[in-house]
Amino acid sequence: MNTPVLLITPPFTQINTPYPATAYIKGFLKTQGVASYQSDLGIEVVLKVFSKEGLKTVFASIPENADFSDNVCRMVSLQNEYISTIDAVMRFLQHKNPTLAYNICEGDFLPEASRFQQLDDMEWAFGTLGIQDKARHLATLYLEDLADLIKEAVDPHFGFSRYAERLGRSATTFDTLEEVLTAPPSFIDNVSTDLLKQKIEELQPGVVCLSIPFPGNLYGGFRCGKFIKDNYPHIKVIMGGGFPNTELRSLADIRVFKYVDYITLDDGERPLLNLLEHFAGKRDTSTLKRTFLVLDGTVHYLNGGREGDFPFNKTGTPDYSDLLLDRYLSVIEIVNPMHRLWSDGRWNKLTMAHGCYWKKCSFCDISLDYINNYVPVNAALLCDRMEELIEATGETGFHFVDEAAPPALMKEMALEILKRNLKLTWWANIRFEKSFTADLCRLLKASGCIAVSGGLEVASDRLLMLMKKGVTVAQVAQVTDNFTAAGIMVHAYLMYGFPTQTAQETVDSLEMVRQLFFNGVVQSGFWHLFAMTAHSPVGLDPAAYGVVRVGPEPGPFANNDLIHEDPSGCDHEQFGPGLTKALYNYMHGVGFEMPLQDWFDFRIPRTTIPYNFIERAIDSQHAKSSKENARLVWLGNLPTLEIYKKKKKGSTFKMAKLHFQNKSRSITVHTSIQAAKWLEKALPAWVPSSSQSLRLAEVKALYQEESGADFDKIMQSQAWKELRKEGLLLV
């Protein structure tokens, strides 16, 4: 095709950084010589609406004499204050107007509505955080007030990251979406399609691809599709992304195809390329790949293409060009350290591997390609892609969005980052497995890792085994201690309501969480209620987990979320408010001494967990003998050698000093002349930039060959212990 492809992320996903799907596809299309453009309509709509002219239109659209809440009435009366401050606030949240923080924090600058009622706890929650952070939180509340106004008085579907989400969630039929889509477009719909029209008129695409990662932008996607089909019927409209991949695998409702022409599943590169070849007359319909379409008045799923998917290392570097990278908003929504990373600042999003290397968890969609098909890339290619993205975006922050980043690849990537002397900030999702030793965590920190998130889920060994998590609570405590000691923040995903979970296990799980926070090895967490999905082991075989599926009946549209009964468990939902309240306090370092009963308004059993369980688990980490195949890595600078005379009991003998000038301080290591000279010669081979990659067994053999002595004596020396403390790692 000679006409370009337009890649669209419909409203809304997130306002601090672009969702990366279109950037991945654009990067791939570049490798194929296909011209493409991309747009995050979500941020563009936000920028259009949340501006001086945009707010004038919002307030003018509010019906007069309608029965609105006191909150909306207050905001309407303050509309001039909102209109006069909005542009300055938006620039501040884009890091373009930092001095405004003083006006915001001093008060009487921002108009305040209901969201500001939570400010009683702000000083306690934020403590002595800087003025910029406090101002961004206040500015975020200001925006959320305006969002509330729009939702109540102008467009009931509005939300910064969840536009009409309820229409797409658990929608086994297309009826509700169809009803709304055939109704007149809403205020936000019109803003969105006006922007879409401008892009189509400017770029003249022959194909528009709609990326739908979440239920929260499904309606926006269909609304865009309807606009294109109504006004530009010659343009082919393709939908793909996380929502179709999980929810639309049994799609049969022909009405969907009034809004899109094709829906593809799983990795989008090959299906899209096959469709482009089909549009160019080079491929028959029967050889399309993982594609839904209408033939002879019926929905068909075609998967006749013989070509395999493109290897993960051949899909190209994500390309963020065309996106408004300097106009995303850095907000602080809630006082949660990990949630702040998600919403504050712009991150280049990358993936270390396709799929999950573990792919066993019984609550996860492990039967689907995006989990089950594990294909890693090598560390050199990852760093090549990071350097390309830094050059293209000017941003050195990376969020690795893997289901679970592989520890071995994380190690190699960290070594490659240090070898190239890249100055990065990055974070990732992991499994709390024993591979994360204290030394590996220190290596990750040195390469720029600032945080990890991982699933502790239900902090019960019986349930963790039933989930096939492959970890124990004690192991989680030890691994999180290793991360925390290295200066890496830890966020724990927490779950309640897993099949057969008892009230006792829920209470004991909370006690484990209390102790993890009390011992300072977890800094952030979030509880969520277990949800059964159709593509997980639990959803595929509920009886094996002691639950009964009771609905919904499979429908012709979306099929993923399942309703179940747990005959052997407890009333899980009643625990939610108490668990959330307790966790909020623990994250802020308070409430540890309170009885667990105080968090709940109904009787709960007493915990059976010893008060020092986590402390004992952490202390039980014994120094393990170093593995012979572990690599030696020296993170410090190279030393200078000084030989000096030392007197002891009337005798004079020669000793050696190794002087190290490291970034934060200088250190001196005293040892024998023989050991010092050997270390001075050996250390250059242990720095990450060295072309050598020496394992402990090799170092021992070399030392034995050169000195005739036992290297274990070196490893038992005080000098070795000091070097280990200062940055000599075995990984």
Image: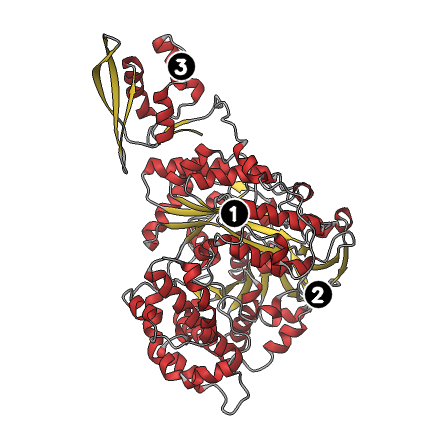
Does residue 603 appear to the left or right of 585 in the view shown? right
Examine the rendered structure and indicate whether residue 107 appears above or below residue 248: below
Q: Is residue 517 visible?
A: yes
Q: From the top left corner, tell me how far across and down residue 643 is, in percent.
A: 21, 16
Q: In front of the other: label 1 or label 2?
A: 1
Query: Which sits earlier in the primary sequence, circle 1 or circle 2?
Result: 1
Residue at 55 percent of width and 52 percent of height: 267
Q: Earlier in the sequence, mark 3 or mark 1?
A: 1
Residue 494 at what x, y percent from top left? 59, 51
Q: Which residue is mark 3?
A: 713
- Judging by the rendered image, the residue that carries numbered circle 1 is 517
Outermost residue to the bottom? 65
Indicate left or right for 675 with 579 as reference.
Answer: left
| Discs 3/1, front | 1
Secondary structure at numbered mark 2 = loop
Relative vertical location of residue 532 with respect to residue 690 in this rendering, above or below: below
Which residue is located at x 35 percent, y 31 percent? Answer: 726
Question: In the image, residue 87 lies at what x, y percent?
Answer: 33, 74
Q: CA distance from mark 2 to mark 3?
A: 71 Å
Residue placed most toward the observer, 590 or 161? 590
At label 3, the amino acid type is Lys
Q: Residues within 10 Å of mark 1 (few under 14, many from 20)?
A: many
Give, as a three-letter code, the residue at label 1.
Answer: Phe
Can you tell which of label 2 and label 3 is closer to the viewer?
Answer: 3
Task: Point out which mark residue 104 bears.
Answer: none
The residue to which callout 2 is attached is 556
Q: Amino acid at mark 2?
A: Pro
672, above or below 93, in the image: above
Q: How is the image coloured?
A: secondary structure
